[in-house]
Image: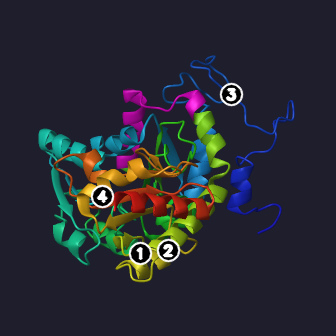
Amino acid sequence: MSASDPHPETRTAHAAAPPDPGDGAVVPPLQPATTFVQGAQDGRSYARDQSPAVEPAEKLLAELEGGSDALLFASGMAAATAMVQALRPGDHIVAQHVMYWGLRRWLSGFCAEWGIGLDFVDAGESGAIAAAIQPGRTRLVWVETPANPTWEIVDIAAAAEAAHAVGALLAVDNTVPTPVHTRPFEHGADVVFHSATKMLNGHSDVVAGALVTARPEHALWRRVRGTRAHGGAILGPFEAWLLMRGMRTLYLRADRASATALALARHFAADSRVNAVLYPGLENHPGHTTAARQMARGFGAMLSLRLAGGREAAARLPGACGVFLPATSLGGVESLIEHRAGTEGPDSPVPGDLVRLSVGIEHTDDLIADLEQALDRVG
């Protein structure tokens, strides 16, 4: 790298742009305009599909992921559903069984109603994706790695090979690792998804989603772009500005949280009150070898504990914490803890004894001490 070709940490800290040439401001400006003079130089007409407010963050995210084009949406679900809504009746999706529960539930209902085939598979099992693919019909394979909230690892290269063998696209949910720890395009993915609400923004104050593509000329991507434009699901100007603000510290936050998560995983792996620590950075994790290949810089800020005290202890643990906050979501500067089965409801596939931890940027010793005292309290 050189001054003319800086590292991504430097590009991100500077919002991938020089200071404003007019007034020298080091913070990117906020452009709230919704309509534009016809015949202007850049050819804009209306902000629903041509907003200058979202383009800087889209450009930076595409650059960080190594993609060719990116689209920001008003939420992660808006982005994910736009990808599926670009399919046609009769098409087929292979999706991962362990994934964000809200999307899994929506997929089940939407696909049944709109005549789209859907098969959920254990994507971490060798050959499971290839076995579920229907040649001539499968158009999309959707995986999440590490998979929320049990953190199984999917081999992205193997999933891409299976999808591409029948002309399907591979979409990878990269919300948890972010491009700091995983760059799915380098392993063959076609589309990368983010709930940008989470680690990309990092401050628990923006709801946003994003899709990035390696091939903007693909017909499915053109339909996704049209879905956003006509459906009006673009991110608002202020939210886009806040997202860019958050992304400027992405590398610092992601590296710090990942290092702390690994320290917590190693500490509690030997704790008799914990039956299992689910974290791909541990050498005994079933997917560790694949994770180490795909996540060379770190293993992310998320881990789960399965408690020896069972479901009752797991349900009580969040309320016993003080530094960890009992809240849903993930990826903020504050550490969060949640009993996922209780949140997801009776149809949840998540074990009842599991608590999910989103590690923030607090001191590692404080987080360990907080979990220690909480485990003492719940027994």
Q: At which x and y percent is residue 98?
A: 27, 60
Position of residue 9 in the picture relative to residue 367 (left or right)? right
Q: Nearer the viewer, mark 3 or mark 1?
A: 1
**What residue sits right under mark 3 in the picture?**
41
Report if residue 3 is visible in the image.
Answer: yes
- As measured in the structure, the alpha-carbon distance from the residue carrying label 3 to the one carrying label 1 is 64 Å
**What residue sits right under mark 4 in the picture?**
313
Above or below — where is 70 with respect to 51? below
- First in sequence: mark 1 or mark 4? 1
The residue under the point 49% across, 51% down is: 324
Q: Given contact means CB atoms under 8 Å apart, are the residues at marks 1 and 2 in contact? A: yes
Q: Nearer the viewer, mark 2 or mark 3?
A: 2
Position of residue 48 in the picture relative to residue 274 (left or right)? right
Q: Quadrant of residue 309?
A: bottom left
**What residue sits right under mark 2 in the picture?**
267
**What residue sits right under mark 1 in the picture?**
271
Q: Classify mark 1: residues with Cα within 10 Å, few (<14), some (14-19) or many (20+).
A: some
Q: Amino acid at mark 1?
A: Asp
Q: Nearer the viewer, residue 35 or 17?
A: 17
Q: Amino acid at mark 3?
A: Gln
Look at the image and say whether residue 223 sits in the magenta stretch.
yes
Q: Given contact means CB atoms under 8 Å apart, are the residues at marks 4 and 3 in contact? A: no
- As measured in the structure, the alpha-carbon distance from the residue carrying label 2 to the one carrying label 3 is 58 Å
Please, what secondary structure does the residue beneath circle 4 have?
helix
Q: Quadrant of residue 7?
A: bottom right
Please, what secondary structure does the residue beneath circle 2 have?
helix
Query: Which residues are drawn in magenta?
Result: 220-239
